[in-house]
Amino acid sequence: MVATKQVSVKDGDVLLLVGTMKGLFLFRSGSARRRWEMGGPHFPGLSVYAAAYDGRERRRRLWAAPQSMHWGAELVSSDDFGRRWDRPESPRVKFPEASGASLANIWQIAPGPPEEPDSLYCGAQPAALFESRDAGKTWSLNEGLWNHPHRARWVPGGGGLCLHTILADPAGRGRLTVAVSAAGVYRSEDRGRKWASRNKGVRAEFLPDKHPEFGQCVHKIVQHPSRPDRLFLQNHWGLYRSDDGGDSWKDVARGVPSDFGFCMAMHPHDPDTVFILPIESDGFRCTPEGKLRVYRTRDAGKSWKPLARGLPQKDAFETVLRDAMSLDRLDPAGVYFGTRSGKVFASRDEGRSWELVREGLPPVVSVKAAVVTLPKRRRRAA
Amino acid sequence: MPVEVSIPGPLRPFARNQSRVALETRAATVEDALAELWSLYPGLKDRVGTEDGRIRPHVNVFVNADNVRDLDGMATRLPAACEIAILPAISGG
């Protein structure tokens, strides 16, 4: 029997949800972010590609998507930081029987727009969007995207045909943007009823037509709430920015050792600052030159600067996957990432310096950072 | 026709923590017996099977010592008294 260690989360703590191939680990630290306490593994033996913290409407809810090779994937929640997980008899997220599809995995759990504090989204494999309007009690398949005429021609990337990124419009326009590997970016203007591909300018290096309408292998897109029409995109070869909500994309890969990579993370307060971690190539999916370097732009992609202080710079053949980098919302912001070799690194000064939080974990597939605000009556510890 | 179903450890929370469930059944086939099991413990259905009704690829169902995949699958007829075992396949990494 695997012993699962619990952590006592206090008001103002920074929480890292670290999903691995063998379970979910929780790290907590005070706002100084100097010492990290580790809890877990939750769901030992199961992969956890998606996790999220929902602190809206005075909730303190963890969401996770453990996936068993035997018994399938499901969406579970906890209101006490993992002491008990709510696992309904009937899984929350499942395909309608008539769809002929079966849920293989959940790749993303994302909050809805600010004006809908009870809305949540899930990105699934096979590629589909699920939505909840009641804070996660009930879920339904987004039929608009599922019935899109392109879907029959989407093809899986190395990780499977998955919907891995969901961006709800922070400006209250009902816009929803998703990314699918390997189909590309799709956008809805009407809260998910109709969808259109948004891949103009994004190349598909692995196809004869390098600029198809869809079929791109987009690895991650990010958005800042203060500039909702500006998006950044890390592609399977290619690094892009859009200033028109994805209508068109411009290459911004100047000054990076490779424009191949998986992860990308947005600064919480500065819409010009983005973090990436370049990978050598799709043939050799490791950090270039054996150096583990995060790259940061502070000018919206005009230039990129390597951030390596405290990170291994010799024989460090690491891989960081698409959801394995995250920032907290403190000032200065903390930056966190996990590697396939089971290491978690943290920076409390926006990437200027780094420290190893933990090594020896199972391969890390997702990292999500959150700052916890507890209701007043519970502020001592949860 | 007495049929006992053995429940794998990870799924026992969905069967009131029982390791074995005795079905008071007239089920003629594996499919009938599992349908009865699902009606008693609905949480097992979605874990053993997929949304479209197939047994999950890394799950095996045995009637006594025989894997139903080697027999007639879900249409396999049940002998007069038997045990149905739901077992995780050897897989992982």
Image (cartoon, coloured by chain):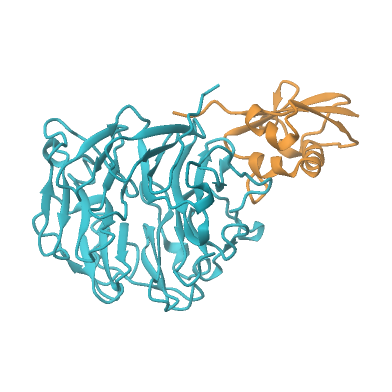
Residue at point 76%, 22% (across, down): B64
Front residue of A313/A253: it is A313
Residue A299 x/y as whole percent? 13, 65
Q: Colour of chain B?
A: orange
Q: Which quadrant would the N terminus of chain A be assigned to in this image?
A: top right
Answer yes or no: is residue A31 visible: yes
Viewed as shown, does residue A278 lie left or right of A8?
left
Relative horizontal placement of residue A135, taking residue A279 as reference (left or right): right
- Classify residue A260 as left or right of residue A220: left
Residue A265 in which image quadrant: bottom left
Compared to A3, does A114 lie above or below?
below
| Residue at the spot 79% in from the left edge and 24% down from the top edge | B83
Residue A375 is at least partly visible in this image: no
Q: Quadrant of residue A319?
A: top left
Give the residue at x 57% y 57%. Answer: A136
- Chain A: its colour in the image is cyan
Q: Nearer the viewer, residue A379 or A109?
A: A379
Q: How many marks?
A: 0
From the top left corner, tell me how far across and down residue B87 is, in percent: 65, 28
Where is residue B78 shown, x and y percent of the image? 83, 30
Q: Residue A371 appears at what percent x and percent y?
A: 38, 51
Residue A108 falls left or right of residue B55:
left
